[in-house]
Image (spheres, rainbow, N blue to C red):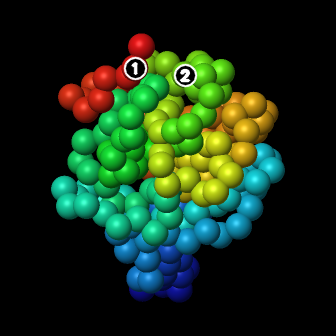
């Protein structure tokens, strides 16, 4: 084989094995529900963390997510319909929605009504935002905003970065299946 095509083939194989941005490829040292916080994301919203996600395979088994709420990984074959919920959503179904380009607003179950109204306004049933209470948030967090391979912890729902995050990452290019739907399954009926 001539040198130039061999070099091109080698580079192509390396790129395929390594992935381009580290957000969704399988990795020898990360599997299933494991993930790795890489540091600040470079999309311009202060505090957003880039997450290396182990894989995006389907499984009907429970997944032991290292990061909670998870920002990707193995997940259930059926996604949870997007919209606002007043009850917790199983991680495995929410992660599938993230794979489809959804943004997950995992909120403190004890938020006051005004904060819940703000979240509800960001999560209409026809959009790609999933909002649900999450009892295991970090201490002091009002909401953890998550997209596939991106996450931001906020201590106030009124923080302007919440709306900026939704605008940046809803159907974002970091999601493996950003153009896939976030509704149409039998799982989840958003609260009115």
Query: Taking the image as drawn, is residue 19 in sight?
Result: no
Q: Earlier in the sequence, mark 2 or mark 1?
A: 2
Q: Report helix, strand or loop for mark 1.
A: loop
Query: Does residue 80 lie above or below 189 as drawn?
Result: below
Q: Label 1: which residue? A: 191
Position of the N terminus by quadrant: bottom left
Residue at 55 percent across and 53 percent down: it is 137
Q: Tell me where residue 94 appears, x and y as whole percent.
A: 39, 44
Count of numbered badges drawn on the protein: 2
Position of the C terminus by quadrant: top left
Query: Does residue 178 lie above or below 47 as drawn?
Result: above
Query: Taking the image as drawn, is residue 151 in sight?
Result: yes
Viewed as shown, does residue 63 lie left or right of 1? Answer: left
Q: Report helix, strand or loop for mark 2.
A: helix
Q: Residue furthest top?
A: 192
Query: Does residue 144 lie above or below 103 as drawn?
Result: below
Viewed as shown, does residue 162 lie left or right of 147? Answer: right
Instruction: Find residue 120 and name its label.
Output: 2
Residue at 78 percent across and 33 percent down: it is 160
Instruction: Kindly check if marks 2 and 1 are in contact, taking CB atoms under 8 A apart as contact.
Output: yes
Instruction: Find residue 144 and name its label.
Output: none
């Amino acid at each position: 084989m001539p040198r130039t095509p061999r070099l091109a083939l080698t580079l192509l194989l390396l790129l395929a094995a390594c992935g381009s941005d580290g957000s969704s490829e399988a990795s020898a040292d990360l599997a299933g529900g494991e993930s790795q916080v890489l540091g600040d994301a470079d999309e311009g919203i202060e505090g957003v963390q880039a997450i290396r996600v182990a894989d995006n395979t389907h499984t009907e088994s429970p997944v032991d997510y290292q990061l909670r709420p998870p920002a990707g990984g193995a997940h259930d074959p059926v996604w949870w319909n997007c919209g606002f919920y007043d009850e917790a959503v199983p991680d495995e179904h929410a992660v599938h929605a993230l794979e489809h380009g959804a943004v997950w607003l995992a909120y403190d179950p004890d938020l006051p009504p005004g904060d819940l109204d703000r979240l509800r306004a960001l999560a209409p049933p026809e959009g790609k935002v999933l909002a649900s209470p999450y009892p295991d948030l970090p201490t002091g967090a009002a909401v953890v905003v998550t997209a596939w391979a991106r996450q931001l912890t906020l201590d106030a729902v009124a923080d302007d970065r919440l709306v900026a995050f939704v605008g940046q990452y809803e159907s974002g290019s970091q999601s493996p299946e950003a153009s896939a739907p976030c509704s149409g399954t039998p799982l989840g009926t958003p609260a009115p």
